[in-house]
Amino acid sequence: MNEGLVSAVIPTFNRLHYLREAIDSVCVQTRPVSEIIVVDDGSNDGTEEFLADFVGAVPLRVIRQENAGQAAARNRGILAAQGEWVAFLDSDDLWCPTKLEEQMNFLNENPEIDFLFGHMVNFTQDGDASGPEILNQSVYEYCRDNASDLKEFFEMLLLSNPVPTSSVIFRRSMCEKVGPMRENLRCSEDYDWWLKWSLLAKCGFLDRIVERRRLHTSNAILDRQLMLTSDLRVLEDLKLKAEHLKNGAIAEIDAAIHRKRYEIACDHFVARKADTYAYLSSINPLHLSGVILKLKWFAKLFIAKTLFR
C-alpha cells in the first residue's frame, strides 16, 4: 500500500468546457496528490483528444469506457487507484487549493478515521455564495460537535445528506468491505454509498470549505423530482436489509421514508398531480415533526382528495 499517497478520481461525461479547470484545481493543491485518474464515461465532445494531449504537473491516467454513468466511472477509478487514499472530484467542480493539506492534517491527527468530508460552497460565473451550503442545521451542528467520531452519522444521514461528493476522501482498503457504488441508480448513488460507509467505517467531518460546486443548467441537483425519488428508492431498498442493522434502524429508516414521501407529495400538490392523494395517504403523519406539519399534511390530504382525483 502507498501509505499517505492520495489518488484523485475525476469521472467525466461531455464536460470538456469545465474539465481543464477541474484538473488544474488538483494540480495546484498545496499538498499534492500522487496521481490523477480521469475516467471518461464515453464523452463525444472532444474530451478524449484533450486528455490524450494533456500535460500537467501531476501524473494523469485516463480510463475510457462506454457511457455507464457516474457510479460506474467512480468504481472504475477506485479500482485503478494506487494511493492509500482516494478523493473524488466531479469534473464540473473545483477543489479549494488547501483541500488536501487540511484534510490530510486532520487524518494524521485522527488516524482511525476511514472516511472524511467537508463543506462546499456553490458558485456561478458571477461569484461564490456567501457561505457553505448547510441543508439541515441540526445535522451540521452534530457533525461539527463530533467531527472526529461521527457515531450517529447513519442517523444524521437519514435526516439529511450533508456530504458533498467532491469533498470526500476515503481509505481505499475499506472499499472491499463497503462494496462498490450501485450502478443501477441514475441519481443518489453517492447517498446510498455514504449510508454504507456510516455503518461500516469510522467517519469524520472537517468544518471547512474544501470544494466549490459549479451551478449550471445541466446540474443533476436541479432535477428535484429525480433526486427525491432516487433518495426514496435508496431508503426503501435499505429497509429491505434493515434486519441486519443495529437496533432501532428499521423504525428510523421507516420514518425517513415517510418524510421523503411527504417532500415528494408537496411537490406533486403544487403541480396538482393526480397521484398527490395516493402519496399523501401513504404517509404516517406520526413521522412528521411538529403539530403544524401534521396539520399541513391533513389539509393537503383533504384538498387532494377533493380536487385532484
Image: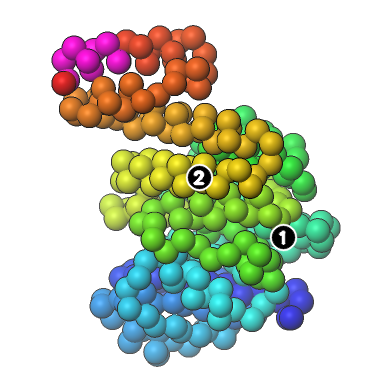
The number of discs equals 2
Name which residue lies at 70% across and 52% down: 203
Disc 1 element? loop
Which of the two labelled residues, at mark 2 and mark 1, occupies the earlier sequence position?
Answer: 1
Find residue 11 and report its horizontal and vertical position in percent: 44, 70
**Where is mark 2, residue-wise?**
240
Residue kind at label 2, given as amino acid type:
Leu
For the residue carrying disc 2, how many other residues have a C-alpha within 10 Å: few (<14), some (14-19), or many (20+)? few
For the residue carrying disc 1, how many other residues have a C-alpha within 10 Å: few (<14), some (14-19), or many (20+)? many
Image-quadrant location for residue 176: bottom right
In the rendered view, does 210 fall on the left or right side of 238?
Answer: right
Locate the C terminus by quadrant.
top left
- Magenta region, mostly helix, strand or loop? helix
Name which residue lies at 71% across and 50% down: 204
Q: Is residue 86 visible?
A: yes
Marking on residue 114: 1
Disc 2 element? helix
Residue sitting at the far bottom: 53
Q: Nearer the viewer, residue 32 or 236?
A: 236
Compared to residue 223, the image places residue 61 above or below, namely below
Residue range (magenta): 300-308
Q: Nearer the viewer, residue 119 or 42?
A: 42
The colour style of the image is: rainbow
Q: Is residue 57 visible?
A: no
Locate the N terminus by quadrant.
bottom right
Find residue 216 and report its horizontal and vertical position in percent: 32, 53
Name which residue lies at 28% across and 80% down: 46
Name which residue lies at 55% across and 81% down: 80
Residue kind at label 1, given as amino acid type:
Asp
In the rendered view, does 25 fall on the left or right side of 233?
Answer: right
